[in-house]
Image (cartoon, rainbow, N blue to C red):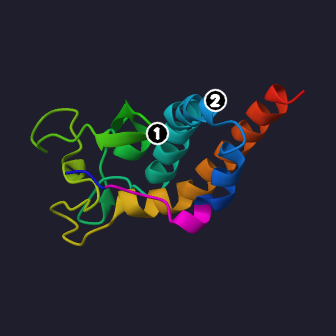
Amino acid sequence: MSIRFELDYSDVRLLEQKMKRLPDKMEETVNEVLHTDGIEIATEEITKVIPNSQWKNRSLDKAHARTSKWSKSENHNLGFTIKSKGGAAKNRGSFGYLVFPNEGRGPSNPVEQRFMERGMKQATPKIVAKLHEKIDQTLEEAFR
């Protein structure tokens, strides 16, 4: 299962205006930001909302997704995908509650936790700020 997260048009109106000034360079610039800083920021913000695994309100004495490399990413043109490594809870080294990462359900917590949505909500303004920064830098270099 994957969650598709898109920006509201009003969030990118200024970016669009900037990109029109040098359209042949912008696709490369946006991809560079999204595939490096974007993935890093999004993964970091999602990780912040993943709790340590618990069983009967006690922290388990094992590796936790929050302190492990729980995700993998894929680059797309003008986008990226972050997926949990997931796997069945019975598999060693697996974070079973991340099989459906947005839900984050497990035996001790049957309530949806919405890790991906909550993390992306925090990551979006930071990623947009990075896009502005890099686009401004690209424009400045092109018009010197």
Asked where in the image residue 82 lies, by quadrant, the reply is: top left
User: Within the magenta stretch, is there residue 7?
Assistant: yes
User: What number is the disc on residue 78?
Assistant: 1
Asked if the stretch drawn in magenta spans residue 87, the answer is: no
Q: Which residue does the numbered mark 2 point to in the structure image?
A: 25
Label 2 packing within 10 angstroms: few (<14), some (14-19), many (20+): some
Amino acid type at mark 1: Leu
Q: Is residue 110 visible?
A: yes
Q: Main secondary structure of the magenta part?
A: loop
Q: Give the residues in magenta.
A: 4-11
> Height in image: 85 above or below 105?
above
Task: Please tell me whether residue 69 is drawn above or below residue 51 in the rendered image.
Answer: above
Give residue 23's position: percent from left, percent from top: 63, 37
The residue at the far bottom in this view is: 111
Q: Residue at x 22, y 53 (%)?
A: 97
Residue 78 horizontal side relative to residue 61, left or right: right
Kindly report the distance in space between the C-alpha atoms of the residues bearing marks 2 and 1: 13 Å
- Identify which amino acid the numbered label 2 is placed on: Lys
Give the residue drawn at x 46%, y 39%: 78
Residue 46: image location, x then y, percent: 44, 52
- Comparing 30 with 142, the one in front is 142
Q: Position of residue 69 (x, y in %)?
A: 39, 33
Q: Which is closer to the viewer, label 2 or label 1? A: 2
Residue at 38% over, 34% down: 76
- Look at the image and tell me whether residue 64 can be seen: no
Of residues 129 and 104, the one nearer the viewer is 129
